[in-house]
Image (cartoon, rainbow, N blue to C red):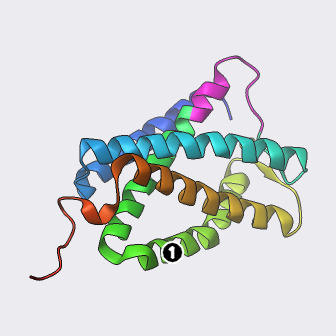
Amino acid sequence: MTTLEMLVVTGLYMILLVAVIYFTRATLRRVAGAFVGALAASLMALGVIALCEALGLWNIPFEPNLYFLPIFYLGTAITLAPVYLITWRLARRFGWRGLAIFIGIVAIIGPPRDYLYAITFPAWMVFAPGIAPILADSAAYVSMVVLGHAVMRVISGPARQDRLARQPPP
């Protein structure tokens, strides 16, 4: 993946982030929490990428310059932030069960999404054969959602305490 491709993808996800902020009616505090959660999960994602490359599960070629890795890190955070605003709404509406179902769905659809990217853009990612890369990719998705949501919750508070949360009848 080149720097220009990363910037274009990040720009598209930035548009998605703005739309998600608007449609979820997120407060500034919630957006800040989602972004801090995304920064934490993005840092973890870089570690997972390095570990899985060292284990030979996949390869994500990086452009060999000093600024690509920070752009990749921030770009990954921008792609993750909308996810945490969605998990916040799910937790607010459906509680931990809704969050658990969402995490299960992410575990199932994450690897096919990445494999589709790898097939469509082979210069971006190459998977090793076998089931291990699929399981590692699924575990990475689950870990990113759980960590990011947890950090957002610490920063912004529980979803049920938001002003838009449904209140039990008196």
**Residue most extreme to the front:** 170
> Is residue 67 one of those drawn in magenta?
yes
Relative vertical location of residue 113 with respect to residue 94 in this rendering, above or below = above
In x, y percent, where is residue 50?
79, 41
Along the line of sight, the residue nearer the viewer: 43 or 82: 43
124 to 8, vertically: above or below: below
Q: Which residues are magenta?
A: 61-73
Q: Residue at x 73, y 26 (%)?
A: 63
Query: Image quadrant for the C terminus?
Result: bottom left
Task: Name which residue lies at 60% across and 34% down.
Answer: 73
In the picture, the quarter occupied by the N terminus is top right
The residue under label 1 is 100
Secondary element under disc 1, as helix, strand or loop, is helix
Q: Residues within 10 Å of mark 1 (few under 14, many from 20)?
A: some
| Viewer-side residue, 74 vs 11 | 74
For this view, does 81 lie left or right of residue 104?
Answer: left
- Residue at the farthest bottom position: 169
Q: Where 111 falls versus 74 (above or below)?
A: below
Above or below: residue 20 compared with residue 47: below
Estimate the x, y position of residue 47 in percent, counting from the top left: 73, 42
Q: Quadrant of residue 128?
A: bottom right
Q: Quadrant of residue 116?
A: bottom right
Residue farthest along the left direction in this orientation: 170
Image-based side of 148 in relation to 25, left or right = right
Q: Nearer the viewer, residue 56 or 170?
A: 170
What is the x, y in percent for residue 166? 19, 72
Count the numbered circles shown: 1
Residue shown at 70% from the left, 63% from the top: 139
Residue type beneath disc 1: Ala
Percent position of residue 81, x then y = 44, 47
